[in-house]
Image (cartoon, helix red, strand yellow):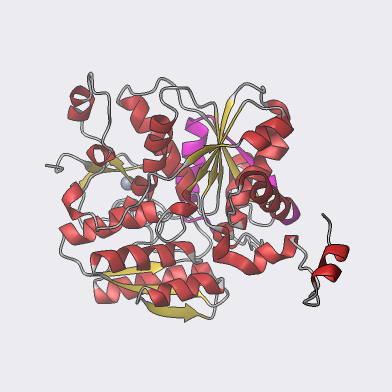
Amino acid sequence: MKDDFKYKCGNCGQIYNIEKDIMLCPGCREEFIKGKPLKGVLKVQLPDRLKNSLAGKEKINVFDFLPIEEKFFPPISVGNTPLIQAKNIQKELGFENIYLKFDGTNPTGSFKDRASYLVSAFAKKNNLNEIVVASTGNAASSMAGIAAAAGQKTFIFMPESAPKAKLVQCLQYGAELIPIKGDYDTAFDLSLEFSRRTGFLNRNTAYNPLTIEGKKTVSFELCEQMSGREIDYVFLPVGDGVILSGVIKGFSDMKYLGIIKNLPKIIGVQAEKSSFIYNAFYKGQFDLNYKASTIADSISVNTAHNGYTAVNDLKSAEGEMILVSDDEILSAQNYVSKMSGIFCEPSSAASFAGFLKFKGSISKNKSVVLLLTGHGLKDIDSAVKSIKFPKIFEADIDYIIDNINL
Ligand SMILES: [Zn+2]
């Protein structure tokens, strides 16, 4: 029985049932205006009964906190990704508790699977077999993969510039891929119109409230994996701001339920050349003509659709934002790979680059979690920019031994 989970508008506070035709708050939504974040983004509100049912429970089942029953989720394993203590990095930087939460081990190699998993379950529960999504790459390949597990069909609107691996993934999973001449925002608009005309379920990030809700599951896992030890800082990459809102929602839900006492300090990291939310957070206004161009494609957005919500969430959580350059991102990607064995994509490495910039303000004994959201193999073209390929050797062992660093 999940009927007592509701949607609540972050703008006017109105409550709605969780139904297929409710996406943005009907009272606050505006027709999508280019350059402007979405108005009336909804969030799931937990029923009060969960508070009482938790008393004395040692192990928490994450499905208890989600608005869809477990039986509707597709037969594929999402979440429960590793939390790795980065001992080599700790040693070199003099910290005692640095943890890498690597979501590249999700089925499609991305954190986005958490949102796709819940959207797919919602579609199953409501007998909807077609799902539409606009994406810079990861949300698309994620939805395609998770929907394939559920036997659902996906229609994907993606900028033609998306990294090839992500396009290939969509096609391997059998999705209907619609590459667009234009940017993510254009793909976003087209996909909404496509959903409107066909009646197919739209999974667009922020627009579909279940995307924030699905992403909150990482916070539950983190608390479980830390076995009661407090998390002091969480660094995460920010593009549209939905992961930011999802992570804060997860910790806030746990605080509401009495599982934790305090939220960790949340530090959102953006690329210098994709700083829509950073600018709004510190300047108090949105630049509606902003044009992003960072190497970290997953966080490259002109208009953060979740902009209003993300800024409000971060303010109420007393978090901060930080900017990193593309060079810092590539160098962080390479450093994390070499020091931990975790090869993450550039947008994920932004978390680590942010930590390197911010670490002077953190006591060495504090616990720091770095959210690494995607696998490095998803964007090889960027990864090669920070490495040097070796020359080709003659097939002669004496020559090889004489010419390499032993
Ligand atoms: Zn509203």
Q: Whole-percent x and y of residue 163?
A: 56, 71
Q: Residue 8 appears in which quarter of the rendering? A: top left
Locate residue 405 relative to residue 12 in the image: left or right: right
Q: Indicate the position of residue 10 as horizontal and vertical percent values.
A: 37, 42
Snapshot quadrant of residue 376: bottom right
- Residue furthest to the left: 1
Question: Could you tell me which quadrant the C terminus lies in?
Answer: bottom right
Residue 196 occupies quadrant: bottom left
Give the residue at x 23% y 18%.
56
Residue 321, compared with residue 76, is above or below; it is: above
Compared with 155, 373 (above or below) is: above
- Give how far across and how far down residue 3 sits, in percent: 14, 43
Looking at the image, residue 230 lies above or below residue 397: above
Please report the residue visible at 40 percent of the width from the left and 62 percent of the height from the top: 142
State the extent of the magenta-drawn residues as a range: 303-327
Q: Is residue 136 left or right of residue 115?
A: right
When the figure is inspected, residue 372 is found, relative to residue 290, above or below; the finding is above
User: At x 40% / y 54%, what residue is drawn?
Assistant: 206
- Residue 317 belongs to magenta span: yes
Q: Nearer the viewer, residue 267 or 18?
A: 267
Q: Residue furthest front?
A: 398
Q: How many marks do you count on the picture? A: 0
Work out whether residue 304 can be spotted. Answer: yes
Quadrant the N terminus occupies: top left
Q: Is residue 291 magenta?
A: no
Q: Position of residue 232 (x, y in %)?
A: 54, 26
Q: Nearer the viewer, residue 303 or 389?
A: 389
* Camera sees residue 302: no
Taking depth in this image into account, of 126 and 232 the one nearest to the observer is 232
Please, which residue is most extreme toward the right here? 402
Q: Between residues 351 and 134, which one lies in front from this camera angle?
A: 351
